[in-house]
Image (cartoon, rainbow, N blue to C red):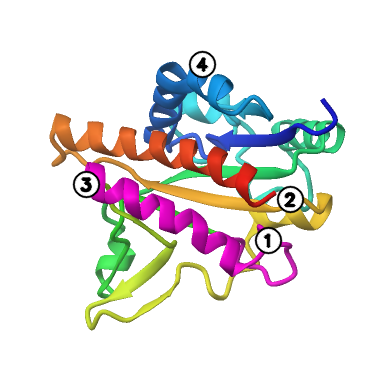
Amino acid sequence: EGSALRLLFVCGQHGDERGIRRGLRHFLRRHGDAVAQAFPQLHLAVLADANPDGFAARTRTNAQGIDLNRDHLRLLAPETRALHSFIRHWQPHLVVDFHNYPARRSFLVSRGLRLGWDVCIDLPTNPAARACGDEAAFALLFARLGHVAQEHGHLFGRYGLYRRDGSFRHGTPQLGDARNTIPLRHEVPVLLVEARNPSRYDSAEDRKLIRTAIAATAWEICRWAIAVR
């Protein structure tokens, strides 16, 4: 028990991000038992719906109008306080924060910017937040995901914006992102996972590909977290 790796998946802070819930539930239904068998040294806790009121209302915020992903500093919402209470008592070694990004964001399109992956994975943007080891350790995760991508056709990348000329910048370079208050407050490393939300133009096969990409990401994070611990 004392040597177990405690890994916390947090999903659904934004109620209108429905695709990521489906992808994570797909992972739990199809691979939950296999994770327990393959990684007996791993204790996995999953908060699959961090904003149930927002999910029911299809709103980004909770019933009080609070963006939970921007509430980790002030802790105004009961949902955020409950999450922080769990982190404080369970003391996970790693938190993985799951989100969706829209297939097309009008303000990005108007500026010639795009997000081009099925799933983005990245470290906190706030330099004061303790990341997952270092960039070398983080590169090991991408190396493994690269093999998965070649085998199944998924597209993985860092959470960043691409200009028409092909240049890249981080998605939130000027934002002391609120999710980073989790590692600042609890001294626990955090990974961000942003999956592409399917659009009405996506076929059933496209949607399946995104779900399986989310499941593959979750599996490889479990494997990676044990390897670099």
Q: Amino acid at mark 2?
A: Ile
Reading the image, the residue beneath label 4 is: 33
Circle 2 — which element?
helix
Instruction: Tell whether 203 sits left or right of 140.
Output: left
Residue 26, percent from left and from top: 39, 23
- Picture disc at residue 7: none
Under mark 3, the amino acid is Gly
Disc number placed over residue 182 in the picture, else none: 2
Q: Is residue 35 above or below residue 196?
A: above
Query: Which residue is located at x 43 percent, y 42 percent?
Result: 217
Magenta-span inclusion, residue 70: no
Distance between the alpha carbons at the discs numbered 3 and 4: 25 Å
Q: Marks 2 and 1, Cα distance to the nearest angstrom?
A: 16 Å
From what the image shows, is residue 4 above or below residue 37? below
Which residues are drawn in magenta? 123-152
User: What is the crowding at mark 4: few (fewer than 14 residues within 10 Å), some, or many (at least 20)?
Assistant: few
Q: Earlier in the sequence, mark 1 or mark 4?
A: 4
Q: Give the mark nearer the N terminus: 2 vs 1.
A: 1
Q: Which residue is mark 3?
A: 153
Label 2: few (<14), some (14–19) or many (≥20) C-alpha neighbours in 10 Å: many
Helix, strand or loop at label 3? It is: loop
Which of the two labelled residues, at mark 3 and mark 4, occupies the earlier sequence position?
Answer: 4
The residue that mark 1 highlights is 133
Q: Residues within 10 Å of mark 1 (few under 14, many from 20)?
A: few
Q: Nearer the viewer, mark 3 or mark 2?
A: 3
Quadrant where the N terminus lies?
A: top right
Q: Is residue 218 above or below residue 146?
A: above
- Dot 4 or dot 2: first in sequence order is 4
Relative height, residue 5 to residue 26 (above, below): below
Camera-side mark, 2 or 1: 1
Judge whether residue 109 can be spotted in this image.
Answer: yes
